[in-house]
Amino acid sequence: MALPLMQRATAVWLVENTTLTFRQIAEFCGLHELEVNGIADGEVAQGIKGFDPVANRQLTAEEIARCEKDPRATLRLWRNPAAEGEQKRKGPRYTPLSKRQDRPAAIAWLVKFHPELSDGQIAKLVGTTKPTIESIRERTHWNIANISPVDPVALGMCKQSELDIAVAKAVAKQGKDGVMSDAERMKLVSTQESLSQEPEPRVPSSISGLENFKIGAGERSREEAKVDAESLFTGLGPAEEDDEE
């Protein structure tokens, strides 16, 4: 709920110049009911001059009269002068002083792991300027030797959902503009072409077959050796055996 300007001073004026209940004044001014009661008793807001909400165009006399007749009614703020001319701020977001030193690391991370992001998207994510992004991208930053890429989400400079949305927009824009690397373009084929292509030869995922082949070859070599040895001894005749004895 929008609050009026100078809440306590407005409450002082309403207590002194209207018959509104403490609850109505407290709800309108964003105060506790006991605090408004203290203002009426002179224990709170001593020395504060009343601020006329009617003269400052925050309340109308008709609105005050309506609520005075019905204690259950709630005052409605007519207009907040502080909100006049306020528009949605454009440009990079505000980065707290405690996190500004981490901005180059976040920019380096985005440039390295999300090259599809534009400088404008990076500027909005981490609250920086395009010259800074360009200096880090081209490695001309004065402190480039000491900059290590760090995830801006981990640094608390943006939300993961914001980063995902920015990346999705960048990827969609690249696809719409036809920006695609040669490797990605070579991989794209039509459905008919992919169905008509012969299956590519695949490297066996296991070498168990090769192991069996080696073991079998070894067994065969041992068997051949065994046969040769037996034929050698069995080939000796009886005379040769007697000579050996």
Image (tube, grey):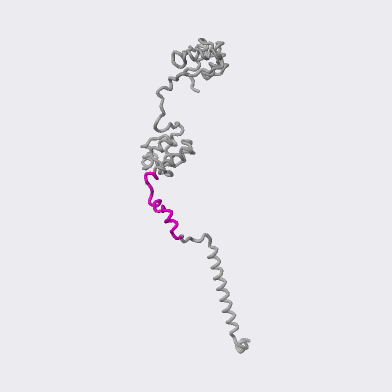
Where is residue 29 drawn, in percent x and y? Answer: 51, 18
Q: How many marks?
A: 0
Instruction: State the residue in front, 227 or 12.
Output: 12
Where residue 105 sits in the image (x, y, percent)? 43, 39
Q: Which residue ends up furthest to the bottom in the rendered image? A: 239
Q: Is residue 189 magenta?
A: yes
> Depth check: 173 or 233 in front?
173
Tell me if I can see residue 145 in this picture: no
Which residue is rendered at x = 56% and y = 68% of the image? 215
Decide if residue 243 is on the left or right side of residue 6: right
Residue 190 on the magenta segment: yes
Magenta stretch, main secondary structure, is helix
- Left or right relative to 111: residue 26: right
Which region is colored magenta? 174-198
Q: Position of residue 154 (x, y in %)?
A: 49, 39
> What is the x, y in percent for residue 14?
51, 13
Residue name at image x 48 percent, y 19 percent: 77
**Which residue is at 40% across, 23% downward?**
85
Residue 198 in view, yes or no:
yes
Work out which quarter of the rendered image holds the C terminus and state it.
Answer: bottom right
Determine whether 23 is above or below 114 in the image.
Answer: above
